[in-house]
């Protein structure tokens, strides 16, 4: 087995071992087993760094290592469990395990003393296992299985304080809202499976590239897949569960809203990008842009520190989804990575503040806490600068990549400037509401002197994760000349051409993962033959170099890449390719042609200009938002109370979150309840009435049949029996056992016979 695959399996297994041991034996272990959970997830983190370093050295975004095992086979239907490790996987493994490990460590201080302490750490292990399964799966079937496991784990963690009605309601809300998106996700999976006949990612990519699914059906299938992301990544209109999920413990909020559950939808969309048609991606882009501005405006008026961060998460998720929708999966995933670190820091920092303020979450009762909590304040300020997009902090680089991609999309398709405009407005608002949180919490005078006097810096178990995450918020994006562009070593940004189409834009992904499952034999190793010819069209799968693997024979996947490597051990697949495939065209030819055409040069020029302009505008947007927050909450040039009084309708709309929850309550939930009541009435009256009526008729017929049986059938049978019994009794009375009686009977009978003879025969 390939060492990378072995490490990946260990990374996946260790958190579930933590779950099992802590769930059953946690209460019997020292410190109730928290060290076990921290240690096992920490081991997964170390192994993730090993895989990360391997792919750093490879420096090829197309490099993949894959291995599958048959799970079950029914006739011709077979399902395999498989592991896929590539650059995208390597980055996500580090993100998930880093945040999970630090959340485990933070929780050992924050949750200490809770009566279900061991159970809490067990659930953290389960949650981490499920998210790692999403990252490592090589098929949509197991992606969906782990997807649902994440949903169930989030249910138990959000509702961990189930004795509170608000927490019990929140976890049910999260679970049910996600069911809506997951239904669409499953239908999309079934559509692709029906068309292609496989669940494997690379098989699906190859099938769609060959035209197995086309036109409106391909668009519909892509949008159905994206519905899963709309639920998990809390996009409008299925965003309503996430703010209420703040009812869970604060470290859980950091885990769910930073690197795991909400990131799953973005990761899935980026991973399956070759399955989305141009129109489906346009739908994705607009959904993300609308979510970004929608949530940002709501965050302006939040007074609960955790809810403010929750709406910030919604807005940033909109950025990521929009980036993937405009064709820049790498920008979306880059922002996912940097966001995971600074948002985890912000949530854990808010938890430290709440802990120090004796569970006070309302920012109107805070103020001046930087003097009491200098480490927490420094970490949160660094993370806030990062999320606002101030250079050279990490958020600046990732947000610039997102805005640049959106602007390039608009420049190439003038009818679609709106996503960029909405994202730029959201960038201004982000700087405002994030520094509003910082200024209201850590600056100014204390608004609750008693709570302020009792406040204190938290223990090292809680400050250590804050320091680490605050540091990553600064450096994770890289610096010019020092780690600049590091993300490109792992995730390739697909080159997306945009031309006018009948439905808006038509996007042809010029680069995406090669279907390695078509390029290798899965039974035993076969040496790759020497081939030096250029790519050509033929039956079978076309590799990045244009060579064909047909009938199980392995072709050289490196003819177009002198630095590529391929090794086959058992059913392990390792391929290093330029990862190019232009939906049906031989990838080697398409890639070479795309690199030399004037249209491609113009495309690159547009993107270069767009990123330069976006960089300037993003810096201006961040500065404007921060300046406005300073003028409102530090300088007091403007008064939020006066603005609220001047625009009461706007404030009321934002404070009520555009009445989306009320709309769902009055129209969706109420109609569901009416439908349920109608169904119950129909069931009680019609269905039960029919069933009960048939029952009553059957019972009546049974009673009537019983009476007939007893009176007539049984009466006749019994009468015959009584007669025979009477005759038998009479005859049996003759059986006395006395010879003289028998002799008398014989003589009597003889006399009778004589008399009959004389009467009948003699006349």
Image: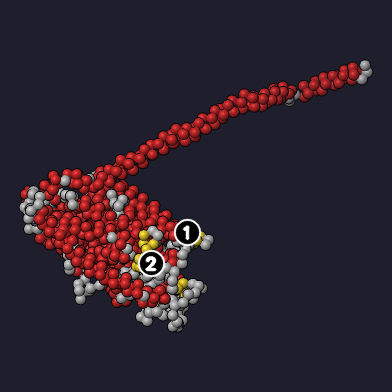
SS at badge 2? strand
Q: Is residue 716 above or below residue 494?
A: above
Image quadrant where residue 393 sits: bottom left
Whether residue 466 sits left or right of residue 724 in the image: it is left
Q: Residue at x 38, y 36 (%)?
A: 677
x and y, in percent, of residue 344 in the image: 22, 60
| Crowd band around label 2 with a 10 angstrom C-alpha radius: few (<14), some (14–19), many (20+) | some
Task: State the separation of the CA atoms marked 2 and 1.
Answer: 23 Å
* Scheme of colours in the image: secondary structure
Q: 455 or 606, which lies in front?
A: 606
Instruction: Please identify the quadrant where the N terminus is shown.
Output: bottom left
Q: Which residue is mark 2?
A: 508
Q: Return the residue found at the far right.
A: 762
Q: Residue at x 29, y 65 (%)?
A: 411
Q: Residue at x 47, y 60 (%)?
A: 195
x and y, in percent, of residue 577 in the image: 38, 75
x and y, in percent, of residue 408 in the image: 28, 66
Q: Is residue 212 visible?
A: yes
Q: Which residue is mark 1?
A: 194
């Amino acid at each position: 087995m390939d060492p990378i695959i072995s490490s990946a399996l260990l990374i996946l297994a260790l958190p579930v071992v933590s779950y099992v041991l802590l769930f059953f034996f946690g209460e019997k272990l020292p410190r109730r087993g928290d060290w076990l959970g921290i240690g096992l997830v920490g081991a997964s983190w170390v192994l993730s760094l090993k895989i990360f370093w391997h792919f750093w050295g490879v420096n090829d975004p197309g490099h993949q290592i894959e291995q599958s095992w048959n799970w079950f086979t029914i006739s011709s239907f077979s399902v395999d469990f498989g592991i896929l490790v590539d650059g995208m996987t390597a980055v996500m493994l580090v993100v998930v395990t880093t945040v999970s490990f630090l959340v485990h460590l933070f929780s050992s201080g924050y949750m200490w003393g809770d009566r279900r302490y061991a159970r809490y750490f067990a659930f953290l292990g389960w949650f981490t296992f499920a998210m790692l399964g999403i990252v490592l799966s090589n098929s949509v079937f197991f992606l969906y299985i782990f997807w649902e496991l994440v949903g169930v784990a989030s249910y138990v963690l959000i509702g961990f304080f189930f004795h509170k009605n608000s927490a019990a309601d929140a976890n049910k809300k999260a679970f049910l809202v996600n069911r809506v998106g997951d239904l669409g996700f499953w239908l999309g999976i079934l559509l692709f499976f029906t068309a292609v006949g496989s669940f494997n990612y690379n098989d699906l990519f190859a099938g769609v590239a060959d035209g197995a699914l086309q036109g409106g059906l391909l668009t519909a299938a892509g949008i159905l897949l994206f519905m899963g992301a709309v639920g998990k990544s809390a996009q409008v209109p299925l965003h309503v569960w996430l703010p209420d999920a703040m009812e869970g413990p604060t470290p859980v909020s950091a885990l769910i809203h930073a690197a795991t559950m909400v990131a799953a939808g973005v990761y899935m969309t980026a991973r399956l990008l070759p399955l989305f048609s141009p129109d489906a991606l346009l739908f994705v882009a607009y959904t993300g842009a609308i979510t970004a501005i929608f949530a940002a405006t709501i965050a302006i008026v939040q007074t609960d520190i955790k809810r403010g961060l929750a709406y910030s998460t919604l807005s940033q998720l909109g950025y990521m989804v929009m980036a993937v929708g405009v064709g820049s999966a790498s920008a979306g995933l880059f922002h996912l990575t940097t966001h995971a670190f600074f948002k985890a820091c912000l949530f854990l920092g808010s938890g430290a503040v709440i802990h120090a303020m004796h569970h006070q979450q309302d920012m109107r009762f805070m103020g001046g806490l930087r003097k009491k909590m200098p480490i927490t304040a420094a970490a949160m300020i660094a993370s806030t600068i990062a999320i606002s997009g101030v250079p050279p902090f990490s958020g600046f680089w990732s947000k610039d990549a997102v805005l640049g991609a959106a602007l390039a999309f608009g420049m190439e398709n003038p009818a679609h400037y709106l996503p960029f405009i909405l994202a730029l407005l959201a960038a201004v608002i982000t700087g405002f509401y994030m520094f509003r949180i910082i200024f209201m919490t850590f600056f100014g005078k204390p608004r609750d002197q008693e709570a302020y006097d009792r406040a204190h810096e938290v223990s090292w178990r809680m400050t250590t994760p804050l320091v680490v995450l605050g540091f990553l918020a600064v450096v994770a994006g890289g610096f010019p000349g020092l780690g600049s562009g590091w993300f490109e070593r792992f995730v390739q940004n697909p080159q997306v051409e945009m031309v006018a189409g009948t439905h808006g834009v038509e996007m042809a992904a010029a680069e995406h993962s090669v279907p390695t499952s078509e390029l290798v034999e899965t039974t035993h190793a076969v040496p790759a033959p020497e081939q030096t010819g250029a790519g050509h069209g033929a039956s079978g799968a076309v590799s990045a170099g244009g060579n064909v693997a047909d009938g199980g024979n392995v072709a050289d996947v490196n003819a177009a890449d002198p630095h590529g490597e391929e090794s086959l051990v058992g059913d392990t697949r390792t391929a290093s390719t330029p990862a190019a495939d232009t939906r049906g065209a031989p990838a080697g030819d398409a890639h070479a042609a795309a690199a030399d055409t004037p249209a491609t040069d113009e495309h690159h020029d547009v993107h270069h200009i767009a990123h330069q302009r976006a960089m300037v505008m993003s810096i201006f947007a961040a500065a404007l938002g921060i300046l406005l927050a300073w003028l409102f909450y530090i300088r007091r040039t403007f008064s939020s109370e006066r603005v609220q009084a001047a625009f009461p309708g706007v404030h009321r709309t934002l404070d009520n979150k555009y009445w989306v929850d009320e709309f769902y309550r009055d129209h969706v939930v109420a109609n569901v309840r009416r439908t349920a009541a109608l169904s119950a009435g129909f069931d009680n009256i019609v269905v039960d009435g029919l069933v009960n009526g048939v029952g009553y008729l059957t019972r009546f017929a049974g009673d009537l049949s019983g009476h007939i049986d007893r009176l007539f059938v049984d009466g006749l049978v019994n009468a015959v029996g009584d007669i025979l019994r009477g005759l038998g009794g009479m005859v049996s009375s003759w059986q006395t056992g006395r010879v003289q009686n028998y002799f008398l009977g014989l003589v009597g009978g003889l006399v009778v016979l004589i008399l009959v003879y004389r009467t009948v025969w003699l006349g």
